[in-house]
Amino acid sequence: MKLPNSGSKQWYGVGTFLFFLFFCVLIASRLLLSVELGLKQFIGLGITAFILSCIIGLSGFFGKKTFVIICSSFSTIGFAYALFISFTRMNVGWSDVTSIISFLVISTFGIIVGVIAEIVRTLLKKSPSKKSHL
């Protein structure tokens, strides 16, 4: 899969797609658990999806592709695990809380790992190669 170039307007489309993807997955996990969704829950889930999609979309827009790949991967794992918890009702009575918290923790971990990977990548690109003097 080829990512758009930095500064490309395609990143707006990527961010919008990710927003709707994350929002729909979070809503689906609530509906699978038969949790009543009010306006506050919709707004909260929307804000969560918006923040995560903006972080990924803006990072790609500014050319941080390593971060985007890692963060997107962890977010995908996070919402897959949230849906798994919702399908299996793994923690009876607590599935609604554990599914959203697991999504947030895994996604946050992905952001942290992505930032570290991007810093390492930047440092490796800037470090001068030392040639052997033999």
Image: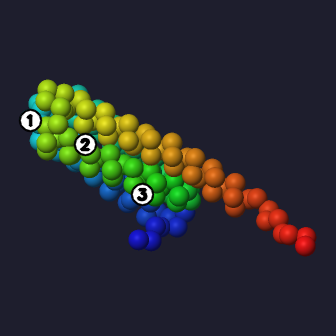
Q: How many labels does the image show?
A: 3
Between disc 1 and disc 2, the foreground one is 2
Q: Find out whether the residues at labels 1 and 2 contact each other: C-beta distance under 8 Å.
A: no
Q: Which colour scheme is used?
A: rainbow
Residue receiving disc 2:
82
Please report the residue visible at 32 percent of the width from the left and 45 percent of the height from the top: 78
Percent across and percent down for residue 120 are 63, 52
Q: Which mark is residue 93?
A: none
Side of 94 relative to 56 (left or right): left
Tell which circle, 3 or 1, labels the residue nearer the N-terminal end.
Answer: 3
**Which element is circle 3 on?**
helix
Residue receiving disc 3:
12
Percent across and percent down for residue 122 are 66, 56
Q: Quadrant of the N terminus?
A: bottom left
Q: In this view, does 99 lie above or below 69?
A: above
Q: Residue 34 carries which label?
A: 1
- The residue sitting at the left extreme is 34
Percent across and percent down for residue 57 are 45, 53
Q: What residue type is labelled 3?
A: Tyr
**Of the pair 103 and 7, the residue shown nearer to us:** 103
Side of 66 relative to 57 (left or right): right
